[in-house]
Image (cartoon, rainbow, N blue to C red):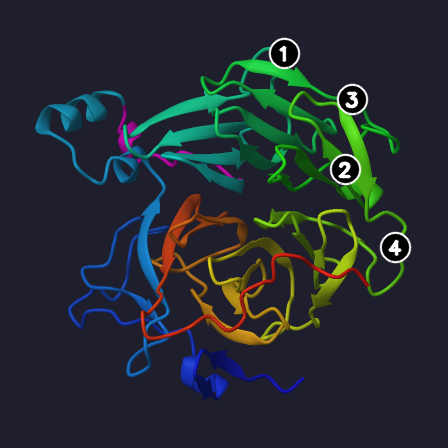
Amino acid sequence: MNIKIIVPGILIAAALLAPRAVIAADAPESLPEASTRTASVEIVFPPLPERARIRFVRSIRTMRDLKGGKESGFTKFLSALAGGDADLPLVARPYGVWKQGDKLYITDTTASAALSLDLKKMTLTDIGNKGEGRLKAPIGITADAAGNIYIADSGDSKVKAYSSKGEFLWQNGDLGETGGKLNHPGGIALTPGGELLVLDTGNKRAVVLTTAGKFVRQMCRNMKDPYALATPANVWVEKNGNFIISDPLLTRIHVFTSTGGYVSGFGEQGDSAGYLARPRGIATDSVGNIYVADAIFNRIQIFNRKGELLLYFGSPGQGPGELTLPAGMFIDADDMIYVVDSKNQRVQIYQYIKYPDEQPTDAPSTAGEAK
């Protein structure tokens, strides 16, 4: 495949946009394991002299990161007495991520729990770590405007709901393949119509539930190549209701209408720029570009709606802006990009940079034509 990297108004050879970052010359040559530090100067992609498109903002790995690294002497003293909890990872093996308002929600498959991080109040709430609503292997997570939280639990093949305070509300179904019964669900997202779109990974389909857990319909089942879903992993729902699915086994990205009609797809197996090795997290920005987290490539690739590579950012490692086994991803209305950096036990935050003198060329239409 002849890979070219395209940015609006510019056509550039791939080598020019290697994922290097602009970092101060006096920056340390080595950083501590899974560093949560924010660089003293901006880390941007692509490097100079090209116009920056992605800016690294910060990492969240510990309570100290959540609080912006600010602690009084007394707080540090208390932290030391507690065994230095402020510097312990908040999650063991994070996977899913969602942002609603000031809260960032993260699933932790190893800890069998989830977290709600209040970025404004700088507090956290544990979810699903005890009682009837205890989680087993949580994957996808989403939340509605009221703060209710919905989690796809692959461990016992259920969707579980919690209040904004983390109180257990309900869980649906049992292991199965019909109706609302699920088989190791993965991604989950809220639709514009206020329903839950769940990837029923083991049954190779998408399922729609109400926010009370009632089965509505199924989509995308028994589709033929190239539309088939071998291992639907992560899902992103757009404002018009269309949804995008990543499939690690087929190394494909699929785009569907809100009713499950096939719109388009792209992806070819490989481990270099423009190819896909193990696509996981997926999201779109305000322009309509499609972002794909690759757990083997250890970078985020940005494609236009035709599946052409625009840019990739991040690089394998543990330092600021780097990634190891990226998983879930979320992009908010301000084009802030939240990437679960799974092996490094943190969330990496970047921002897509738009310029007033540029007009979007690849924004999605408000309605898709099914094929």
- Nearer to us of marks 4 and 3 is 4
- Nearer to us of marks 3 and 2 is 2
Q: Secondary structure at mark 2?
A: strand
What residue sits right under mark 3 in the picture?
173
What residue sits right under mark 4 in the picture?
223
Mark 2 or mark 4: whose residue is earlier in sequence: 2
Image position of 204 (left or right of 210): right
What residue sits right under mark 2 in the picture?
207
- Residue 16 vertical placement versus 301 (above, below): below
Give the magenta range.
Answer: 83-94
Q: Secondary structure at mark 1?
A: loop
Q: CA distance from mark 3 to mark 2?
A: 12 Å
Q: CA distance from mark 3 to mark 1?
A: 14 Å
Q: How many marks?
A: 4
- Residue 270 vertical placement versus 281 (above, below): below
Mark 4 or mark 3: whose residue is earlier in sequence: 3
Q: Disc 1 marks which amino acid?
A: Glu
Q: Disc 3 marks which amino acid?
A: Gly
- Nearer to us of marks 3 and 1 is 3
Quadrant the N terminus occupies: bottom right
Looking at the picture, how far across and down is residue 129, in whole percent? 53, 19
Image position of 142 (left or right of 76): right
Image position of 96 (left or right of 165): right
**Image point (57%, 35%), residue name:** 141
What is the magenta segment's predominant secondary structure?
loop
Q: Disc 2 marks which amino acid?
A: Val
- Nearer to us of marks 2 and 1 is 2
Mark 3 or mark 2: whose residue is earlier in sequence: 3
What residue sits right under mark 1 in the picture?
132
